[in-house]
Image (cartoon, rainbow, N blue to C red):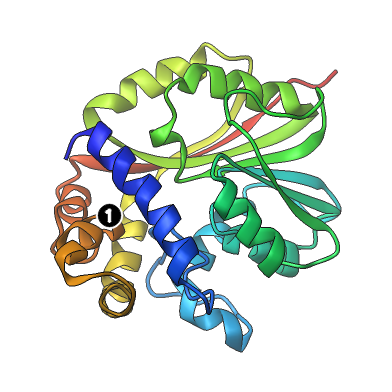
Amino acid sequence: MTDFLWSIVFRFLYWYISKIDKKAEVIFMNYGFSRNNHQIKLEEKDIKDRYSAQLYDYIANGTTVAGKDILEVGSGRGGGLSYITRYLSPKSAVGLDLCELAVEFCNKFHTLNNIKFIQGNAQEMPFADGSFDVVLNIESSHRYPDVDLFLKEAYRVLKPGGYFLFTDFRYKKDLGKLSQQLAATDFKLIKHELITDEVLEALRLSSTEREALIYKLVPKILHHLIKDFAATEGSPTFNNFATKEMEYFNYVLQKKAA
């Protein structure tokens, strides 16, 4: 599927989920993380979203977020930022998302005292310079028209010495371009790894539950399309990860100290 068609699907999904998901069954939209089926400790209410929560846990632990002011760019349905806020104890947490319906949902559903969600563009963030200790961007940047501008904005809104936790996927042929884009910034590289195998493991372990939710919420005519979007086992997206045509990366980057 072309990037243009995927962008239409993505916008439709946000709108559709916002309209029909009255019980907030979909609060995560990432592919998840599992390494040798190790399971983090979760409250009962979070177990159904285990693998998606484990991705946030792994990425957020790329630095210390406890007591910090954090921003998630591309916060979606808010499950990830809620997990970080409840389990990892940041001082404050802000979610930024382009979709107004998603922001409205998050502010109604995620009602912790130190968390809020704001509508805005990742390429023109509505924050002052040096506003955050940590910026996270998880499985979102592949939709951005101008990644270079996004990287500049992520650098700008970080405090000196702050951390940028950046994870997403690309076709293998595009990883070199991304590396060049990051090298052109002033970020210091702390860590870079491919976690495709861990994402694949999570997708295998969660495919049955993902498909059950698709059958419950999505019209039959769209099942094949949404299975691919959700990367359920056997879908084209899942197979692209399995063959390593697409890779899932994780970066820990740091802004220069003052």
Q: Residue at x 80, y 62 (%)?
A: 89
Residue 172: x percent and y percent?
24, 33
206 lies left or right of 62: left
Instruction: Tell me if 88 is positioned left or right of 81 in this view.
Output: right
- Sort mark 1 into few (<14), some (14-19) or many (20+) by Cα contacts within 10 Å: some
Residue situated furthest bottom in the rendering: 44
Please identify the quadrant where the N terminus is shown. Answer: top left
Left or right, 25 with respect to 213, comes to right
Asked if residue 32 shows in the view, the reply is no
Q: Residue 175: horizontal and vertical position, in percent?
A: 32, 27
Q: Quadrant of residue 248?
A: top left
Total labels: the figure holds: 1
Q: Is residue 25 above or below residue 199?
A: below
Q: Which of 28/206 is in front?
A: 28
Q: Which residue is mark 1?
A: 229
**Along the viewing direction, whichever of 33 and 74 lies nearer the viewer:** 74
In the displayed orientation, state which residue is furthest to the top.
184
Q: Amino acid at mark 1?
A: Phe
Residue 165, compared with residue 108, is above or below; it is above
| Point 27% across, 73% down: residue | 207
Q: Residue at x 28, y 25 (%)?
A: 174
Q: Is residue 188 visible?
A: yes
Where residue 170 appears, x then y in whole percent?
31, 35
Q: Secondary structure at mark 1?
A: helix
Please state, as top left, top right, bottom left or bottom right, where the C terminus lies in the image: top right
In which quarter of the view is residue 234 placed?
bottom left
**Would you place residue 53 above or below residue 104 in this image?**
below
